Image: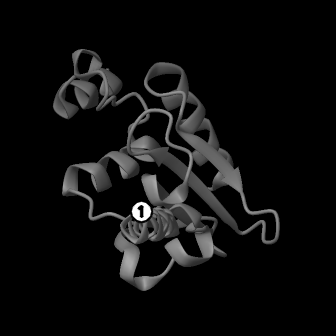
Amino acid sequence: MKKGIVVAMTAILAGCASSNNAGIGLSVLEREPYLRADRLFTKDFVQVQKAVFKHQAICNPEVKFSIDELNPNFARVTKPYTPGATDFNNTVVLHLTLNKERNSQGRVYSYYATTDNQVQDMFAIIQRPEYCPEKPELNAPESEQSAASAS
């Protein structure tokens, strides 16, 4: 009987320990330990939102854009690590700050370590919204796209 109680208590404690990360919020995620990269964009939030909508239509409807309700100078582009993930510890977040020059400072945050490709994919949502890491057959090399847009 004592063994049964010990096993049950261990299972309960293990469940509690594994669920601690599920409650991570943006206030925890958007801190220095989870910062993966940053970059300045020459786009304002309207241009960023248009790029996200284009990326959603072509590539991944799970990519989302939102303006911070408490501060309209902050916005976020979010992308789940795996399809269907909804919690922030399983999401890559591109936090954007609109500066007085109407440019956006972007910082990528993620709970888990990301690869350079994952970080670059977040930046590409804004810079090259037609680029689809999920659908490589749609991707033309950047040099071909530059030549096509120049003509």
Q: In this picture, is 6 found above or below 121?
A: below
Local crowd size for mark 1, using a 10 Å CA cut-off: few (<14), some (14–19), many (≥20): few
Q: Position of residue 19 (x, y in %)?
A: 50, 63
Image height check: is 127 above or below 25? Answer: above
Residue at the far right in the pictured view? 70
The amino acid type found where label 1 is placed reads Gly
Question: Can you tell which quarter of the image residue 81 is in?
Answer: top left
Along the line of sight, the residue nearer the viewer: 83 or 9: 9
**Point 55% across, 51% down: residue:** 77
Q: Name the foreground residue: 89 vs 41.
A: 89
Q: Is residue 72 left or right of residue 146?
A: right
| Residue 10 place in picture, x, y as percent | 40, 69
Which residue in the structure is indicated by mark 1? 4
Where is residue 65? Give x, y as percent.
63, 46
Q: Tell me if residue 135 can be seen.
A: yes
Furthest-top residue in view? Answer: 137
Residue in the picture at 82% in, 70% down = 70
Which quadrant, please, contains the N terminus?
bottom left
